[in-house]
Image (cartoon, grey):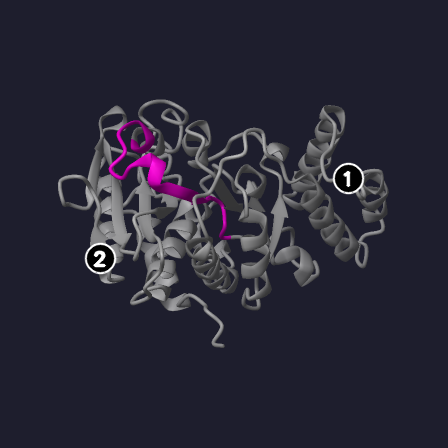
Amino acid sequence: MTTLRGDEARIRALVDFLCSRECNGRAPGTPGGRLARDRVQAELAGAGLEPAAPDGSWLQPVPGCDGHNVLGRLPGRGERAIVVGAHFDHLGPDGTGEAYWGADDNAAAVAVMVEVAHLLRGRELERSVLFCGFDGEEPPHFCTPGMGSVHYVAEPPFPLDRIDTMVCMDLVGHTLGPPGLPAAVGDSLMVMGAGRGEGLGGAVDRAAARAPEGVAPRRMSCEVIPALSDYYAFDKAQIPFLFLSCGRWEHYHEITDTPEKLAYGKIAATAGFLAELVVELAALEGERRYVPGGTDDAATVVSLQAIGTALATVDPRAGMLLAALSSFEGKERLSPAEKQALAGIVSMVESTLSGG
């Protein structure tokens, strides 16, 4: 079977455009934001999707941020759907003649979304796949009615009760940790939220087994971090979700978040993994049931142990991480105090690998 993988040249071209001076940080409602919006629309159309806004167009107005969501659809055989989403807006100019370029946040994820559309082009899946380029994810709109994904859920262009899973991407463009770490660390991609929907963990594992070289998907509980992206609105609406991220790093929300710092091989591999994941999700039997408070504790421990074991080959301090995790082994569900301790470990690992 051919391994799915995104096109690096196309990924680079889209990231470069979204991070250009013309887009000027892509703030919603600005000329640069509209330029980015139009490019996302053109890319999704070029990948063979059909427009999916209620009026038959590609654009869903988001009045609260003076922007638009860009909506495309790969039709499926059945009446149910999967959402694949990534926000394309960023923080705009910084007031000094520079801009917050947002290469990792979130041009890389938009490029992955487009590549998944290309990789699935012509496939006849059981479920439709709704591709959503969300506007207004960044402050001051985050978690407000002006957030594109919040508006999407409040004014759904597709019935929410027919959406089985939402897959969200944010900060998927960088290698985990500084140069020189083992690939088992640097290639890591966190896949959070599988506990929120029945059958999602198995789908993630099967897709991960077919992931191309360059990306190492690792399941994590969504509870180890605060709500950080567009899955927030879907979780509140009790729609199962998966959140793909490499975590925050030293360039997060800085003007130094620029295209040359991204790991394009990993981005292309991430697109291949996500395409495989969408195929798995589309093939799951029955409707996905949301699990309130659903967690993925055991998988989180396994993922952190894998990272810690790899780190131990270059940093003896990783032994402390492995020792801290040993008390959680064999437990499917942790107590509230244990969850808090595990979240602290995740925060420590994220801070260490990001240079914090």
Per the rendering, the mark at residue 11 is: none
Q: Does residue 40 appear in this view?
A: no
Q: In this view, does 118 lie above or below 161?
A: below
Q: Is residue 230 left or right of residue 25?
A: right
Q: Name the residue under label 1.
A: 331
**What residue is rendered at 66% in x and 62% in y?**
183
- Which residue occupies the extreme front position in the image? 286
> Can residue 162 be found in the magenta stretch?
yes
**What residue is rendered at 21% in x and 54% in y?**
50
Marks 1 and 2, the one that precedes in the sequence: 2
Q: Which amino acid does label 2 sit on?
A: Ala
Q: Give the range drawn in magenta.
A: 152-173
Percent of width and height locating residue 142: 40, 27
Q: In this view, does 6 lie to the left or right of 294?
A: left
Q: Mark 2 points at which residue?
A: 45
Of residues 61 and 12, the one nearer the viewer is 61
> Can residue 195 be found in the magenta stretch?
no
Secondary structure under the numbered disc 1 in the rendered image: loop
Secondary structure under the numbered disc 2 in the rendered image: helix
